[in-house]
């Protein structure tokens, strides 16, 4: 078994079974903020017990281990074809070991071959850079939270949302309101303002690679992130839709250029089982540092 294969299987195992520290801290803080013995507080206690059991037993945090999304930064000339082949092998092996559930099915026949590998699965996002380093980030995105993502085309007369940041705010908060507890909240929003329909959604998901406790370097977006987080948590939806003070754990927003005819706001939702992890690799594929 190659070093790269070993490393990718371990990355998958840890991503599936262990919540990143920044997410766990946000969950524990939210538990403290909820009213004692409320439905919201009890939901958070069950979530925390789930997190502990998954880590101890090295088993998936959720029965839906989701879409497997690789974000790979590599130096110019790196063999991306071999990496992708090895990653597919790692996904198959991780599924066989039980680190991933057998989730991926053929969209025409519904057949599940038990490998989690097929057209578009796993998904790869490669980025070349001029430095020699290799960085692999992995996100496992469940279907429940994927189902409550939304894309808006502004202006939207129904929301009184114009082509400005206030219009974006109205669209994003509408996505939260429409989701209610269906996305296994409390969740995290990844948002892209602009782009086309495809790149808007793609870039919105890259926001899940940010730490929950970071701050947007663009002041206008930072203010919008903080405002939406505060406002959403005043809606009373709460964890799993049971009511309470915590509907969202975080909001992360980016922008992309658009053509004048279009103004899209793409909202991706990540559930509380926020599974993302990352590693640096050496040239042989050995893990150096864990990123989260």
Image: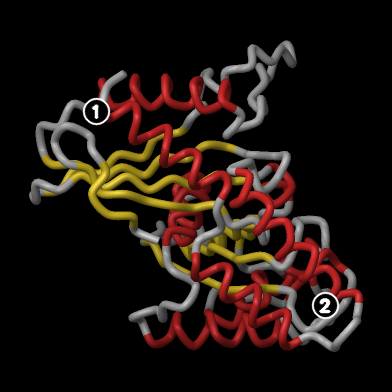
Q: Which mark is residue 41?
A: 2
**Rendered residue at 67%/20% (across/down):** 105
Can you give x and y, in whole percent of width and height, for residue 242 in the image?
89, 71
Q: Nearer the viewer, residue 35 or 176?
A: 35
Question: In the displayed structure, does residue 48 sit left or right of residue 38?
Answer: left
Question: In the displayed structure, does residue 268 sit left or right of residue 240?
Answer: left
Circle 1: element type: helix
3D distance between C-alphas at marks 2 and 1: 46 Å
* Quadrant of the snapshot with the N terminus: top left
* Quadrant of the snapshot with the C terminus: bottom left
Q: Is residue 262 above or below residue 68?
A: below
Q: Nearer the viewer, residue 82 or 266?
A: 82
**Rendered residue at 78%/84% (across/down):** 245
Residue denoted by label 1:
80
Q: Nearer the viewer, mark 2 or mark 1?
A: 2
Can you give x and y, in whole percent of width and height, for residue 187 in the image?
67, 65
Within 10 Å of disc 1 (Cα), the crowding (few <14, some 14-19, many 20+) is some
* Quarter assignment of residue 283: top left
Can you give x and y, in whole percent of width and height, for residue 15 in the image?
50, 47
**Rendered residue at 74%/61% (across/down):** 49
Within 10 Å of disc 2 (Cα), the crowding (few <14, some 14-19, many 20+) is many
């Amino acid at each position: 078994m190659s070093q790269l294969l070993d490393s990718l299987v371990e990355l998958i195992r840890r991503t599936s079974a262990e919540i990143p520290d920044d997410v766990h801290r946000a969950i524990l803080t939210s538990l403290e903020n909820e009213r004692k013995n409320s439905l919201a507080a009890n939901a958070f206690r069950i979530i925390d017990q789930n997190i502990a059991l998954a880590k101890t037993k090295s088993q998936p945090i959720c029965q839906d281990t989701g879409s497997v999304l690789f974000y790979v930064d590599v130096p110019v000339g790196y063999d991306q074809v071999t990496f992708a082949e090895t990653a597919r092998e790692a996904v198959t092996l991780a599924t066989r070991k039980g680190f991933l559930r057998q989730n991926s099915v053929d969209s025409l026949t519904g057949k599940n071959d038990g490998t989690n590998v097929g057209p578009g699965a796993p998904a790869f996002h490669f980025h070349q850079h001029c430095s020699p380093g290799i960085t692999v980030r992995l996100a496992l995105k469940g279907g429940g939270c994927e189902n409550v993502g939304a894309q808006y085309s502004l202006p939207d007369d129904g929301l009184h949302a114009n082509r400005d940041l206030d219009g974006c705010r109205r669209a994003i908060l509408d996505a939260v309101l429409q989701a209610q507890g269906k996305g296994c909240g409390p969740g995290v929003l990844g948002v892209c303002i602009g782009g086309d329909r495809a790149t808007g959604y793609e870039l919105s998901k890259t926001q899940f690679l940010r730490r929950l406790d970071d701050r947007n370097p663009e002041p206008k977006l930072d203010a919008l992130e903080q405002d939406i987080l505060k406002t959403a948590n005043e809606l009373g939806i709460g964890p799993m839709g049971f009511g309470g003070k915590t509907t969202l754990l975080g909001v992360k927003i980016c922008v992309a250029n658009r053509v004048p005819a279009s103004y899209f706001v793409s909202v991706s939702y990540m559930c509380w089982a926020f599974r993302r992890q990352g590693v640096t690799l050496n040239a042989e594929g050995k893990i150096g540092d864990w990123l989260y």
